[in-house]
Image (cartoon, grey):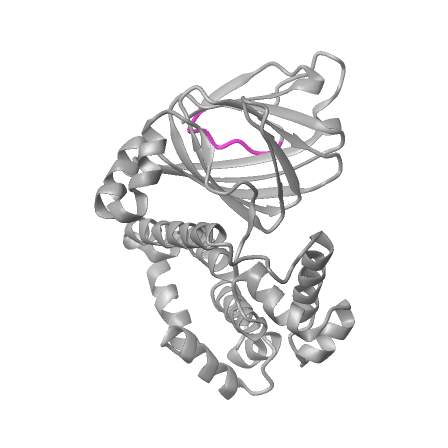
Amino acid sequence: MKYCLNIKEYNISELEYEGKLVSGNNLFEGSSNGKKLDELGFFNFKLENTPGFSIIEANNMFYEDVRISGYNSEPVFSMDFVSQGTVEYETGNNKRVISNGGTNNIWSLNSGYFGYSTYKKDVKTSGFAIYFYDGFMKEITNKYPELLDEIYIKFISGKSFSLNPQYRFTSMEMMQTISQIRNAKLMGKTSQIYTEAKIMELLALQLQQGSESKGGNSNTYCKNAQDIEKIHEAKRLLVADLNQSLTIRQLSRQVGINENKLKYGFKEVYNHTIFGYLFDYKMDLACKLLLDTKKNIVDIADQCGYEYASHFTTAFRRKFSVTPQDFRKRHSLQLV
């Protein structure tokens, strides 16, 4: 994949790279107006190429407002997720799209696409994206024509477009799938086929969300940005201390909205019930602790909000059809 980045405000010369891992400030080699690299901030960019698609992760924070230009030398179908911060995209036809942390969209970008991304000073931004190339898009469209024919026709027409006019909220299921893609190497020899399966799962979730949006069934309870922020605050309170047992009534009082708006608004924003989200959050945390630490099951159960290890084991088995102990053993063997 060929890509070009340029910070216009500092007149940093454009650089091109193909398939390189770029980290820290290595992307930016010099400035003509006296700005040192460590004064600009940081830009961490990880690119993983495969024959049909690329997986991209980016983290950055700048100490001034910056505007980065970019183009691609071939058409791409992009699944874009903003995990943290705020990015404003400006396409070649002057269309502006603002994306905030916890949102996602699908883009189709034509060959020779040129646009800008604007980042605000002192705002840490992170994102995750998957780029499909023409051959891979054609292959999966042939498998799922009813689902992808319309999108593929637009894709090969050379017209850039986004699935949704504005970025949509990223559900818990999407976040879990992204985490599984990131950790796919744990699958050993089967990691490639596992990654492709999870990418298709992520695409299905995005397309389903786009279909619901067109049907007019979303955001009927969250009427404005203030409502949505209160839902986000409820989520933060929900996971802040997993050993607490907040009821929906308590949670609604703390964030200042009624119980119905909290319940149905939470479902709109996160595509999950409140306690369904909490359960999945606990199980995702449990997986990370089992794989990344040597903590015993009792300590992991406690950290995940379970008073008794037996209750934790029952919950984990219900979610993954395997005990925590067996889950850890299986993945440990795959890493050998």
Please name the predominant secondary structure of the magenta segment in the image.
loop
Q: Nearer the viewer, residue 271 or 12?
A: 271
Q: Nearer the viewer, residue 225 or 134?
A: 225
The answer to whether residue 287 is above or below residue 10 is: below
- The C terminus is located in which quarter? bottom left
* Stretch of the chain drawn in magenta: 18-24
Q: Nearer the viewer, residue 66 or 142?
A: 142
The answer to whether residue 69 is above or below residue 219 is: above
Q: Position of residue 116 (x, y in %)?
A: 59, 25
Q: Position of residue 265 (x, y in %)?
A: 62, 64
Q: Is residue 171 magenta?
A: no
Residue drawn at x 69%, y 27% is 66
Residue reaching furthest to the top: 32
- The N terminus is located in which quarter? top left
Q: Position of residue 287 (x, y in %)?
A: 48, 67
Q: Is residue 20 magenta?
A: yes
- Image quadrant of residue 93? top right
Q: Nearer the viewer, residue 313 or 122?
A: 122
Residue drawn at x 57%, y 16% is 14
Residue reaching furthest to the front: 216
Q: Is residue 38 left or right of residue 312?
A: right
Q: Is residue 265 left or right of residue 20?
A: right
Q: Position of residue 108 (x, y in %)?
A: 42, 33
Residue drawn at x 49%, y 88% is 310
